[in-house]
Image (cartoon, rainbow, N blue to C red):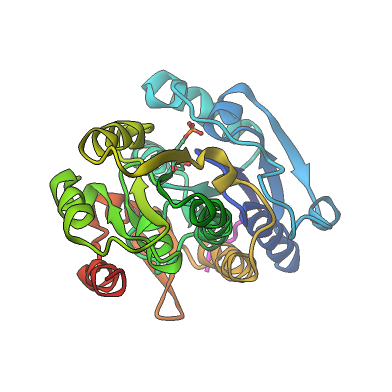
Amino acid sequence: MTQIKKIGLFTSGGDAPGMNAAIRAVVRTAKYYNIEVVGIRRGYEGMINGELFPMDGKSVANIIQRGGTILKTARSEQFKTAEGRRLAYDQLVKHGIQGLVAIGGDGTFTGARIFGSEYDMPIVGLPGTIDNDLYGTDFTIGYDTAINTVIDAVDKIRDTAESHDRLFIVEVMGRDSGLIALRTGIASGAEAIIIPETKRDINALMDRLENGRKDKSSKIVMVAEGEDPGGAFEIGRQVKEKFPNYDTRVSILGHIQRGGKPSCMDRVLASRVGVAAVEALRDGHRNEMIGIVHNEIAFTPFEHACKHHVEINANFLKIVEILSI
Ligand code: F6P
């Protein structure tokens, strides 16, 4: 066990519902173990600019139910440079910080990995992203809330689609991961799901529309944004061209997926990994993400946690194929 007396805490990258619950868990656990917490606003950017302030148990009261992040967040270009990281390290030393808890996703952990290899600063990460695209945790903080937001929205779209006998192409977030589309496609009874992992197969979608049942009054096609947000419009254009008899509309759900009250699952996940983060720093862990795999706390080095390893469960696609006949 190390004698860590002061830690820094920040959120970085895209916000995710449940980040506040994670912040609360880290601050309260640190208090429990008599460790001081310094909050860092706006992620790495705020670290560089010295936006550091003391946090206590009271400063995280009444936030477990709130979406967004009270620490604010940013995507920092400066931290990608050696000079930016040096400025950040100087700030940490100035404030007597002996360890860091980073809450974020792929970009956050890539930054943490590089920083941890350059400076003697233990860092542990908590998986906070709606995309669920990190290896080493079954679910990321924010994913459950986001997929529930999506199905709530798609249920509403279904009502109007049904009334007008329309086909809707619905685009969801996920950057280059299709995990939001995959689960919400099943849960909302989608006709087809188009995700980057299986390469957008527009021909398969056309076949499905050509040869599938014609008597359905509404159809939903779930599209993951992929590298190219707004790509659903192009799919919509091609569908309209090939099937002029379908009354087709495109709906991009966008940033509503990132907001809102975190679900119970996200609050509990955030609380569990938040407690584990402080205990991990005390136990001498560094350069690892803390997730939950098969209901147990799991430690994964940052370099393995980043998304390229997450595989799509082919059964999920098969389920859509079977259930949408
Ligand atoms: O990583 C979370 C996420 O919401 C992605 O799903 C999406 O591609 C991206 O962030 C959008 O980022 P921004 O809000 O910076 O445009």
Q: Position of residue 29 (x, y in %)?
A: 69, 65
Furthest residue in direction bottom, as rendered: 295
Magenta part, dominant SS: loop
Q: Is residue 138 left or right of residue 237?
A: right
The residue lying at 30 percent from left, 42 percent from top is 245
The quadrant of the picture occupied by the C terminus is bottom left
Q: Is residue 202 left or right of residue 137?
A: left
**Magenta includes 3?**
yes
Magenta span of residues: 1-5
Above or below 30: residue 226 = above
Q: Position of residue 213 (x, y in %)?
A: 26, 64
Q: Position of residue 244 (x, y in %)?
A: 28, 37
Q: Position of residue 48 (x, y in %)?
A: 56, 25
The residue lying at 83 percent from left, 57 percent from top is 62
The residue lying at 13 percent from left, 46 percent from top is 203
In this orientation, does residue 69 appear?
A: yes
